[in-house]
Image (cartoon, rainbow, N blue to C red):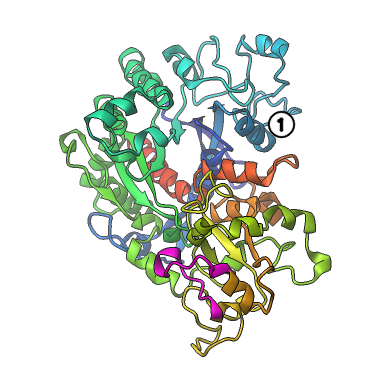
Amino acid sequence: RSSCSTMENNNGGSVVSVLTYVEFYSGIGGWSLALENACRDMLVVRTAAAAAAADDNGVGLGRKTTTTTKRRRRVQVKRLASYDHSDLCNSVFAHNFIKDDDDDDDSAARTKSSSASCQSRNKRKKHNHSSSSSSSRSTVRRPPAAASLPSYPIEKLTVADLADLNADIWAMSPPCQPHTRQHDKHTQHDEMSDPRSKSFLHLIRLLRQLNNSCDDSMPRIILLENVIGFEESVSCRTYKSALLDSGYAFVEYHLTPTQVGISNDRPRYYCVAVRRQYCTSISTRMRNADNVIGKDKVARSLMNMLHDSEQIGKSSVYTSISPLEVVGSDSAAEAATCSMPTIASYLDNDLPPLATDPSNINTAKLATLKIPKSSIAKSASWCFDVITKEDARSACFTSSYGKYFRGTGSVLYYGQDEGGMTARQGQSDTGSTEKDTGATDVFRLVAPEERKYDSKWWERLVAGEGGEQSSTPPLRYLSGTEVARLMGFPLKEDGGDNDEIETAFAFPDWCTERQKWRLLGNSINVTVSAKVAETGMSIYLEGADCG
């Protein structure tokens, strides 16, 4: 098949490259949003000055540059199918990405959705959903899209299903739980036999079978996200071996949102795989070209990170993507102390501390977020990671946020004087370290590992507020929309629909805060993942041009 479909853009006659994709473990559509963000970012090309920020290996810290030039070719993505076992995820996914009244047969990013009754499920077994791909092909049965067929299991997909889809991109974030244990012989066996590993191992087998049976239907790009430590699992080693055997080069990253200017710590492992033929095309062009234009510099720098077959067993995991302005950890730490946005920029306007007038506070919403005194009074509450709106960092949010105290995400102190200091530094807005007289002076809001254990810590916090010990400290959980902003989701309520190629995200009205926390905790950071996606897309498109 052709490398990717193209069409002329009526606006200026520029060429539009259309890449099709399948999202496995689709959840609430994190990878779909990330791919759309990557397309938006690829509207501009970093100039030679930006590319030069990386060293010869493409791993220098880099510094952001504002010098950009317009790309002559636009990029769009079209979704062919999405798969997830959770009905809750599929319902939220459909709310954002599937329109019941959309009858555009040319749009692979839209699939008609109907009810989940037994009768309609039986009808859907005919796999009658609309899709398109980057080239024409014979009409055969199509695998069901999970958003249309709730809880369709990935492990039931066949080689014929994936060959029929013929997607340019596979994007996935497999379950992390089976792959994060200590890897002695016993736990390796447990990992491979864990039911939660079954679908990912099945996809690996399908990839090998697809390579053996129909190479033309192999995805051009494969994007994977998981927790740090996943790369050492036997499942991931099996996956990387399959990539190399199937003709892919790949690059691995450890990245966190602070590296792209988001005030949240969520370190994750990413793997970008690109068909080796496109990498070879770029390398040949680089050797033969006397002058390399700006976008080639980005592709060349990214190319230097890719691992080929002879490097198996000694691959490096990179901690920055300098050509795409994902700074190294040192730069991220530096930014956190100077220009990183404060938590206030991620908060809802109808909740304290931003809503100061009682008439502007959504009291029903606040009631679901306030941490009850019964929880705060427990000794385990000492493990809370407490932040204020003046902080420029927050802890990683997990699916257990609101359920457990330790290591599940930050909680917000919105007391009367919290705006007068930076919680982690104990400083006023003017930089003064003089003592305040409120709660933040009585109880310095520092991370649990930085303070001595005190079972009555919350009483000191209330005392600083001038209240009685029977009072409840002004602590609350972050709302689902606040967590979503910290995870890079473009929210509809924030005007995210203004960009013509960007889908704005919104939770359905029926979705509770706890459901939102669980969904987001299992999702990906959209902004970081977009940079990872742009890595693969840049190399592939450049290689297709060179081929």
Please say whether residue 174 is one of the residues in the magenta stretch: no
Q: Secondary structure at mark 1?
A: loop
Of residues 75 and 215, the one nearer the viewer is 215
Q: Which residue is mark 1?
A: 99
Question: Residue at position x 64%, y 47% from top?
Answer: 500
Q: Is residue 443 magenta?
A: yes
- Give the position of the N terminus as an image quadrant: top left
Give the residues drawn in magenta, as a range.
442-458
Q: Closer to the camera, 185 or 466? A: 466
- Type of amino acid under label 1: Lys
User: In which quadrant will I find the C terminus?
Assistant: top left
Front residue of 384/254: it is: 384
Q: Residue at x 29, y 35 (%)?
A: 233
Question: Magenta span: helix, strand or loop, mainly?
Answer: loop
Relative to residue 294, is residue 189 drawn left or right? left
- Label 1 crowd bin: few (<14), some (14–19), many (20+), radius 10 Å: few
Q: Residue 26, image x and y in percent?
A: 53, 33
**Percent from the top left, x then y, of residue 75?**
51, 42
- Give the answer, above or below, for where 211 lies relative to 331: above
